[in-house]
Amino acid sequence: MTLPTVRSMNASASAYEDKESYKWQRASECLAQRLDEPTLARTLSVCDRESDIYEYLRYKLEQKQRFVVRAQSDRVLSDQDRTLFAALQSQEDVLYESPLEIAQRGGRAARQASLRVCALNLSLSAPADRGKNKPALPVNGVRVYEVGQDESKAALNWVLLTSEAIETVEQVKKIVRYYELRWRIEEYHKAWKSGVRAERLRQHSVANLERMLTITAFVAVRLLQLREQLQQGKSVAAVGISCDKILECDEWQVLWLADRKKAPLPASPPPTVWACLAIARLGGFLDTKHTGQPGWDTLWNGWLRLQDRVEGRRLAREMSGEM
């Protein structure tokens, strides 16, 4: 199905381009300008419900760009006498069932959810307020819903709209995994903004600000890696990952001496789980059974103190003539 371009529409298109919601399409346009065709063909946009916009979905389809968008609007289906949510809720063919670890957040306790997944080929009608003769959007829909949850608590229920194929169970599993990984992007932005405090940077020029944002972006990746290992707990897999995968030799050795005081340096790098807790303790974290996990501010404070000590060690080495 060939879709007419969004750019060739009438005044209503101009109104869309003036709205905040146009940011999703603008980001995709910038991405297309920066990437060559083979790279763009491998790139997939994963978006939350805020991007469930008719014009954005239409743009992605006409440009043949890959996407997974969580649905927010219960749209009318053009080829059926029912809506998107009703169609997926009535789908009885469960493709597979899967457990999912849901992390503690706010007042929500951590739990293991039992999920079921189904999928359908769909054709979404244009919203009535977009005017007549707007094309239907051919997409695939995937529903991920929780079973066995207490009615007093909110059960997980995702409806995902995607350009990806749903012909096999493995293809559907990939789509669900893509959306699960979106949370890592959320955590990265928290590490960047709240952790290394990128939003608080003050520079005299745009160029200097861009340089600092680039530097802090890499630091945020390292903080996120450390915290992810801590969140895995003291499993065999987590304990088996040594901290030299994330920290330089000087960093983990200085951290050991700061955390363990008079304990001699180990022959091999300690686990990453220890490194994350040690950095947090350096930042003021009270490592007890009742304090939970360290926050981004604590990790950043610990990271800064560690870097100060590492720099001091390197300066002392230079002054003593060591290589």
Image (tube, helix red, strand yellow):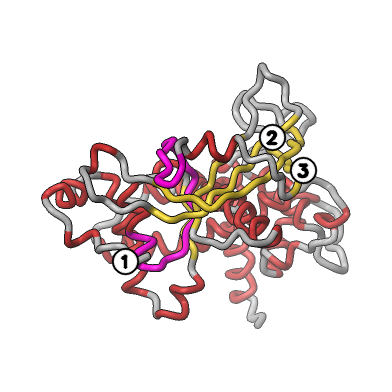
- Name of the residue lying farthest toward the top: 152
Relative height, residue 58 to residue 247 (above, below): above
Which numbered disc, 2 or 3, marks the residue that appears first in the sequence? 3
**Residue 284 at x, y percent in the picture:** 64, 38
Of residue 144 and residue 93, the one placed in the foreground of this image is 93
Over which residues does the magenta segment extend? 59-80
Which numbered disc, 2 or 1, marks the residue that appears first in the sequence? 1
**Residue 104 at x, y percent in the picture:** 67, 33
CB under 8 Å between discs 2 and 1: no
Amino acid, disc 1: Cys
Quadrant occupied by the C terminus: bottom right
Q: CA distance from mark 2 to mark 3?
A: 9 Å
Q: CA distance from mark 1 to mark 3?
A: 37 Å
**Residue 279 belongs to magenta span:** no
Asked if residue 84 lies left or right of residue 262, the reply is: left
Amino acid, disc 2: Glu
Tell me where residue 321 sits by quadrant: bottom right
Badge 2 marks a residue whose secondary structure is strand
Asked if residue 136 lies left or right of residue 132, the reply is: right
Relative height, residue 136 to residue 312 (above, below): above
Badge 1 marks a residue whose secondary structure is helix
Of residue 78 and residue 49, the one placed in the foreground of this image is 78
**Residue 319 at x, y percent in the picture:** 59, 75
Any part of residue 277 in sight: no
Amino acid, disc 3: Pro
For label 2, the residue is 146
Badge 3 marks a residue whose secondary structure is strand
Query: Which residue sits at x=43%, y=43%?
Result: 77
Query: Which residue sits at x=71%, y=41%?
Result: 116
For label 3, the residue is 99
For label 1, the residue is 30
